[in-house]
Image (cartoon, rainbow, N blue to C red):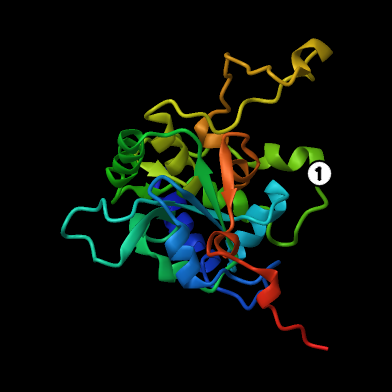
Amino acid sequence: MNRVAQSIGKWLATYLSKELEINGTAPPSNPLHLQASLRPGDVLLVEGNTRLSGAIKYLTQSTWSHAALYVGNHFPDHIPADHCLIDADTVHGVRSTSLEKFSNLHTRICRPIGLSEQECAMVTMAAISQIGHQYDLRNVIDLARYLFPTPPVPTRFRRQLLSLGSGDPTRAICSTLIAQAFGSIRYPIIANENKRPEAATLARDYQPRLFNPKHFSLLTPRDFDVSPYFAIIKPTVESGFNFHNLEWVE
């Protein structure tokens, strides 16, 4: 990316990352319940409230515009004690951050299935090693094309409007950062779209052994939500929700 494009990208990143007064599709989780439910390796999806969030949600046909990886206390000593997440921010690049950053936003926990403690540690360390890398500003420029105004793009074409970005390994967006971390242990996220399998392959005990992954640079926060390899964790349920304790307003 040349200097002019980089300068434009930085200006756009600052402008598009400004928070707006937008009502989420659901209320945020209780911060204490959210903290208690998260485990290292979990992906925290966020319904953002910025101009950039609107473009991502529109193009991906999803509630989610941002993703962060929960790493717990695996950080080096120089990282602030309350930091427990890794994400890629448009302005600050790949960084550590606290859960408080997203406490007022609608979130969802996506948990990878079947990882050992060692494998979780490998994923979190892969993400931590990327701290300091820059955000892929080419992705910001690409997304900005669909903000003013929102174009009447047919649904089936919206995902194709997200480009691969610069391809520079020292630059990332939030979902590619996390995808690469899971890629370090070859953990699947979502496959390329294939034709509908034959009826014989729909047996209940059928498990595909060949995985054709979608390229990490094409993955979005939504893919962790729809992935068949991640469980959805609801903090309210995990905290021991009992509907008998509700007091209904007449």
Residue 190 in picture, x, y percent from top left: 60, 31
Q: Is residue 220 visible in the rendered structure shown here? A: no
Q: Is 23 left, or right, of 210 in this rendering? A: right
Helix, strand or loop status at disc 1: helix
Q: Is 207 left, or right, of 72 in this rendering? A: right
Residue drawn at point x = 55 percent, y = 33 percent: 189
Image quarter in which the C terminus is found = bottom right
Which quadrant of the figure has residue 98? bottom left
Q: Residue furthest front?
A: 244
Residue sitting nearer the eye, 38 or 166: 38
Residue sitting nearer the eye, 249 or 89: 249
Instruction: Please give the residue where the numbered disc 1 appears in the rendered image.
Output: 155
Is residue 169 shown above or below 61? above
Image quarter in which the N terminus is found = top left
Total marks shown come to: 1
Q: Residue furthest bottom?
A: 250
Residue drawn at point x = 75 percent, y = 13 percent: 201
Dot 1: within a 10 Å radius of its alpha carbon, few (fewer than 14), some, or many (20 or more) residues?
few
Query: Which amino acid does the dot numbered 1 rest on?
Result: Thr
